[in-house]
Amino acid sequence: MTSNLLLTPAEMVHAERLAISRGISGLSLMEAAGRSVAASVKRRWARRPVTVLCGPGNNGGDGFVAARRLKDAGWSVRLALLGSRDALKGDAARVAAGWDGEVEPLHPKVLDGAELVIDALFGAGLSRPIQGVVEEVLEDLISMKLPVLAVDVPSGLDGATGAVRGIAAPAAVTVTFSRKKPGHLLLPGRTLCGEVEVADIGLPDGAILEIGSQVQENGTDIWLPSFPWPQADTHKYKRGQAMVVGGAVMTGATRLAVRAAGRAGAGLVTVAVPPAAWPIYAAALTSAIVQPFTDDMEFAAILSDPRRNAILIGPGAGVGPALQRLVAAALATGRAVVLDADALTAFGGSRGEFFGAVHGDCVLTPHAGEFARLFDIRGDKLSMARHAAVESGTVVLLKGADTVIAAPDGRAAINTNAPPDLATAGSGDVLSGIIVGLLAQGLGPFRAACAAAWLHGEAAKEFGPGLLSEDLIDTLPKVLRRLKELSREIPDLR
C-alpha cells in the first residue's frame, strides 16, 4: 500500500462509508481524528489558552473531541460553534454531548486571549465561498497572527483543488487523516497548510485501495523500482541514445538539455544543429556528437539511425514552419519524443495537426502559457493536466512549483520537492534533458517524467541558494548516488 496515494474529499468520504459498512463505526473514526489533533497540539506546544472553532459537520465533531481531550489534560480550552449544538447530527452530535464545557456562539471575540487556535470549522469538501461570521472570524484570525492548527484543511480551502473559497487562514500545522488530499499539495493550498501531518485513524488500507485513486504525491516508489541503473554487462549503446535538436540562436538552452541527458544516464547523446551554429556546440559539448543538417532531408538522415531511440525538440529551437516539420519528422519515427518550449509554441495555431501526430510515447512539458496555446481546458491544475493527457494521448508534465504529471490512462502525480530556487532561466531545459535521458534508457514516459521532476527538485534542494541552471546538472550525480543506495533495498520490477 503506497503511503503517497492522494484522496479527494469525495473519495475520502467514500472510503469512510466503505469502512463503516464493514463494521468500523463512524464514531470511532471521529474519536480517533480528534485524539490525533489533540496529540499533535500537545507534541508541538506547551500548555496555553486554546480556542477551538467548530463547524456544524464532522469537522466540527473532530474539534469537539480534540477540545475534550485537551481540557482533560489540563489545558484552558474555549470552544465556539457555528450554529447551535441542537442542530448537530449523527456522530458530531454524539461527541458534542460529551463536552461538558461552555459552547459559545462563533464570533470574533472568541479569539480574545487565545494563544493557539484549532480550526475545525469546515473540512476539505467545502463547496461554497466562506462568508458571514466565519469570514469575520477568519479575517481577525489572520490579522492577529495567532498560531493555527487546521483540522483536515484550513477552513475555506478546497481539498480537491487547492483553491481558496473566499478566505482561508494560514495554518502552522494541518492534521489530515489517512491520506493527504490534492489540495494539500496544489497551490495556493500548499502555502496555507503549513506542515501537513497525516494521522492514522484506523481506516483500513483495503477501503482506500477499493476507491481506485490514481493520483499520488510524486515519490520514489512510483519509479525507483524500474530505474535504469547500468548493469555489469552494460555498454553505451545498451544505455540508449538520446537525440536533441538544437537551434541557431538560443544555443545555451540546447546545451543544457544535452548535458542533462548525459548526466541522467543516456549512453550517447547526439545534437543535431544548423551548420552555422556547429562550432558553438562542437566546442562546448565534448561528450556529445554534434551533427549539422541543412534541410529536412539531412535531418531525416540523422533520424534514420534507429539507435537514436529518444528525441528531444524544443529548448532553443526557434519557432517557425521549419520547426513544425522537424517535430513531425521526429514523431513519425514512432520513438519516444519529448516536446518542450518552442516545439509546443510552434503548434499553437494548428492544434489538429499536432494532436494527429503525437502518440503514447511522447512527453509534453508545457508551462502555463504554452499549455493555454495548445489546450482549451480550464479548471484546477490537476484536472487540466489529466484532461490534456487524455485529449493528446500523451504524458503531460504541466510545470510550476506544483508540477503535475498526468498519463492518458488516468495516472497522475503531483511533485512537491521543487524549491523556489528553480525559478531561474534554463531550469526547464535541464528538466526536459533529464526526461529524454531516462527515456533513452527504456524508462516509460510517465515514470521518466515523474523521476525527472523529482531528480530536478532534489538537485535544486541539494545546491540551495544561488542556483543557476547548470548547477542542477553538476549536482545531479550526488542525488543519483543517494538514490542508488536507496534502490539497493528495492527489487527490480522492470
Image: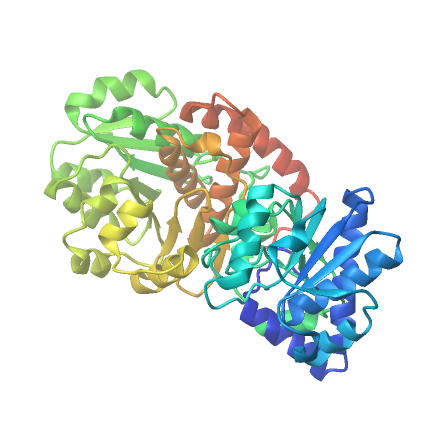
User: Is 208 located above or below residue 493 in the figure?
Assistant: below
Q: Nearer the viewer, residue 300 or 262?
A: 262
Left or right of 136, for residue 430: left
User: Is 90 located above or below residue 295 in the figure?
Assistant: below
Q: Is residue 64 visible?
A: yes
Instruction: State the residue at coordinates (35%, 28%).
Output: 425
Q: Nearer the viewer, residue 138 or 288?
A: 138
Q: Residue furthest front?
A: 109
Instruction: Name the image quarter holding the C terminus.
Output: bottom right
Instruction: Name the image quarter holding the N terminus.
Output: bottom right
User: Is 339 located above or below residue 77 in the figure?
Assistant: above
Instruction: State the residue at coordinates (84%, 68%).
Output: 100
Q: Quadrant of residue 302?
A: top left
On the image, the x and y values in percent for residue 445 come to 42, 52
Q: Nearer the viewer, residue 92 or 436?
A: 92
Q: Quadrant of residue 379?
A: bottom left
Instruction: State the residue at coordinates (17%, 60%).
Output: 352
Instruction: State the residue at coordinates (77%, 60%).
Output: 66
Q: Is residue 212 visible?
A: no
